Image (tube, rainbow, N blue to C red):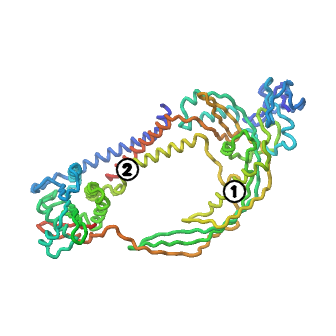
């Protein structure tokens, strides 16, 4: 499938900055027409053979550059329930990355000037999103200790409490990426996405971008969602217990009922920089602009900045103590 | 380099400002010093009498330098005497009923008067610390702080206790440090300075700045990948869990008592009222260990 411009016949793509379909050839807005012909192995536009990766749901023709959406990979069991269209375009991402590199002060100064951009693409990453109705019943014992002194006697008062909690938590769309190529920790750091902007799936959002189908099914990946939910529940519970010196849990009972699963595509920009013969991957949340990826660290900068902080902190503290000394 | 200076401009500015304030306070403070010493009858210019031989020559000299400085700032003679001999006979010869705690007092007062110490006049403003390292036949070591003139007015029994507590904190392990503390405490007490910093250890700025630098590096190092920005409530509909039950019930309460052992016996009560002898009025107090 391909989106063709009604005005000029060019390949229209989804523009994140405008939020509409855009023709880069004639600047037409929303001038697209869905074109569905040919086989899944040939370019709809020029008929050239397509190189299709195992999990790709879109590809770009190597010959004419058209963005082709593979029908059977956005259909049937592979049809996503939801999509979060890209909100940030290519140009803004470059600026955001530069700003981020500057902010990471241990990045070598030459990285900004010498690193070359080898590849950039917008990818719709497949996610499974799980809804749970969870309940956490908790019982524990807590102590509060108070110490005071009267004359030569020190009193220690220990109060023992029974702590009981019972809470319901409705989890809405805990995301787990279903792409093997994407590292789990990177995708986790990419969160959160603003779900207000989720939309029902439409193929046009994929034009101009790359996409994958889910690599593994929702049952296989559910453990990760449950782990996230359990951790959040524990944090939420601990947040309700405060003021104790010690807390010993005695009974914990978590039940979690899966209420729904949504197959969702989330937008991620992938930028690949080359610097001193090494590749540096950066992933940018296509909605919020959050940047994840390791920048090189300059040892000289770590040493000089660390030493500067040390020397000046030492001086400042000595001055402060010197001032306090004589007042 | 440009990035470096831009990044640290506030740190540089604040440090420079603190340095200026520090220099300013120092100048102000050194201008405000006591008048010249007016006692011409004092028999000695020595202030450190290490008869007990607990200090090295180098330490004695350092103490002499410090005392010379502090005397000008406080307007008090500051004297240290260490001993290692029984004072029982000596004291009982002079005051037959005197108790063990006060042997050192008798010695201190006589030593002060004999040498005619005093900043403003003979047997005038000054302090004298006698630390007798000899264990008297009751097994104890006694120390006395003798205060005269304006030092006597300043030093109530609580302040004497405080000073001697601080001396005793170090005296067994490092007598030099203990006596240095004595001289500096006298300075702070007489000039009303250093109350805030009195208990800060000298290595604090160094250690603290090492910690600050390490935290700085750790924090910025952790930025190199990216930060986690989700919360426990991120995926909770409504933003918070529904609490069906939240009860904290007191089951019982237990109170235990413990008697506090005081680390050093308080001798502040003894002699702090002062005694008259040889024409001067002496105050002070003692400790034992």
Q: Is residue A63 above or below residue B248?
A: above
Which residue is at 87% across, 37% downward? Answer: A72
Instruction: State whether residue B94 appears in this view.
Output: yes
Q: Which mark is residue B104?
A: none
Q: Residues within 10 Å of mark 2 (few under 14, many from 20)?
A: few
Q: Identify the image quadrant of residue B259.
A: bottom left
Q: Which residue is mark 1?
A: A230
Residue A20, position as x, y percentages in the image: 78, 35
Which residue is at 67% across, 67% downward? Answer: A251
Q: CA distance from mark 1 to mark 2?
A: 45 Å
Residue B59, position as x, y percentages in the image: 23, 51
Instruction: State whether residue B191 appears in this view.
Output: no
Q: Which residue is mark 2?
A: B203
Q: Is residue B86 above or below residue B35?
A: below
Q: Quadrant of the N terminus of chain A?
A: top right
Tell me the subunit letter for badge 1. A
């Amino acid at each position: 499938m391909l989106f063709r411009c009604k005005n000029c016949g060019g390949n229209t793509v989804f523009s994140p900055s405008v939020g509409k379909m855009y023709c880069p050839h004639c600047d037409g807005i929303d001038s697209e027409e869905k074109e569905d012909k040919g086989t899944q192995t040939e370019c709809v536009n020029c008929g050239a053979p397509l190189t299709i990766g195992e999990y790709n749901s879109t590809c770009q023709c190597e010959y004419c550059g058209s963005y082709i959406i593979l029908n059977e990979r956005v259909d049937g069991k592979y049809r996503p329930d939801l999509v979060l269209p890209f909100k940030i375009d290519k140009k803004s991402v470059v600026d955001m990355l530069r700003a981020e590199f500057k902010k990471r002060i241990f990045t070598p100064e030459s990285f900004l000037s010498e690193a070359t951009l080898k590849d950039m693409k917008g990818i719709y990453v497949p996610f499974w999103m799980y809804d749970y109705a969870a309940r956490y019943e908790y019982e524990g014992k807590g102590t509060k200790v108070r110490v005071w002194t009267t004359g030569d006697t020190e009193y220690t008062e220990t109060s023992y409490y029974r702590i009981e909690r019972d809470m319901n938590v409705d989890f809405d769309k805990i995301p787990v990426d279903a792409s093997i190529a994407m590292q789990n920790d990177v995708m986790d750091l990419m969160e959160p996405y603003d779900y207000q902007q989720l939309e029902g799936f439409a193929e046009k959002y994929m034009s101009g971008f790359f996409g994958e189908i889910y690599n593994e099914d929702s049952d296989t990946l559910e453990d990760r969602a449950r782990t996230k939910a359990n951790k959040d529940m524990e944090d939420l519970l601990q947040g309700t217990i405060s003021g104790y010196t010690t807390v010993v849990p005695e009974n914990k009972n978590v039940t979690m009922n899966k209420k729904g699963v949504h197959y969702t595509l989330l937008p991620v920009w992938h930028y690949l920089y080359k610097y001193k013969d090494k590749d540096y991957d950066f992933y940018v949340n296509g909605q919020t602009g959050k940047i994840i990826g390791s920048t090189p660290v300059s040892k000289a900068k770590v040493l000089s900045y660390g030493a500067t902080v040390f020397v000046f902190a030492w001086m400042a503290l000595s001055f402060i103590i010197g001032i306090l000394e004589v007042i | 380099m440009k990035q470096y200076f831009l990044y640290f401009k506030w740190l540089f500015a604040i440090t420079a400002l603190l340095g200026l304030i520090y220099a300013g306070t120092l100048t102000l403070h050194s201008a405000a010093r006591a008048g010249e010493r007016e006692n011409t009858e004092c028999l000695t210019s020595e202030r450190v009498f290490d008869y007990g031989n607990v200090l090295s020559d180098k330490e004695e000299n350092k103490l002499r330098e410090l005392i010379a400085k502090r005397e000008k700032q406080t307007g008090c003679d500051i004297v240290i005497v260490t001993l290692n001999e029984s004072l029982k006979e000596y004291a009982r010869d002079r005051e037959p009923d005197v108790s063990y705690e006060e042997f050192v007092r008798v010695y201190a007062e006589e030593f002060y008067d004999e040498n005619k110490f005093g900043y403003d006049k003979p047997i005038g403003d000054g302090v004298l610390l006698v630390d007798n390292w000899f264990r008297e036949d009751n097994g104890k070591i006694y120390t006395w702080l003798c205060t005269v003139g304006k030092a006597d007015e300043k030093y109530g029994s609580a302040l004497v206790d405080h000073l001697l507590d601080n001396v005793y904190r170090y005296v067994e392990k490092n007598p030099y440090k203990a006596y240095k503390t004595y001289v500096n405490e006298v300075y702070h007490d007489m000039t009303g300075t250093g109350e805030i910093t009195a208990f800060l250890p000298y290595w604090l700025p160094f250690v603290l700045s090492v910690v600050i630098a390490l935290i700085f590096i750790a924090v910025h190092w952790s930025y190199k990948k990216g930060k986690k920005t989700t919360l426990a409530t991120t995926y909770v509909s409504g933003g918070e869990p529904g609490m069906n039950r939240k009860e904290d019930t007191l089951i019982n309460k237990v109170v235990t008592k413990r008697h506090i052992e005081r680390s050093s016996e308080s001798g502040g009560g003894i002699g702090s009222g002062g005694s008259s002898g040889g024409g001067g009025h002496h105050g002070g107090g003692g400790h034992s260990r």
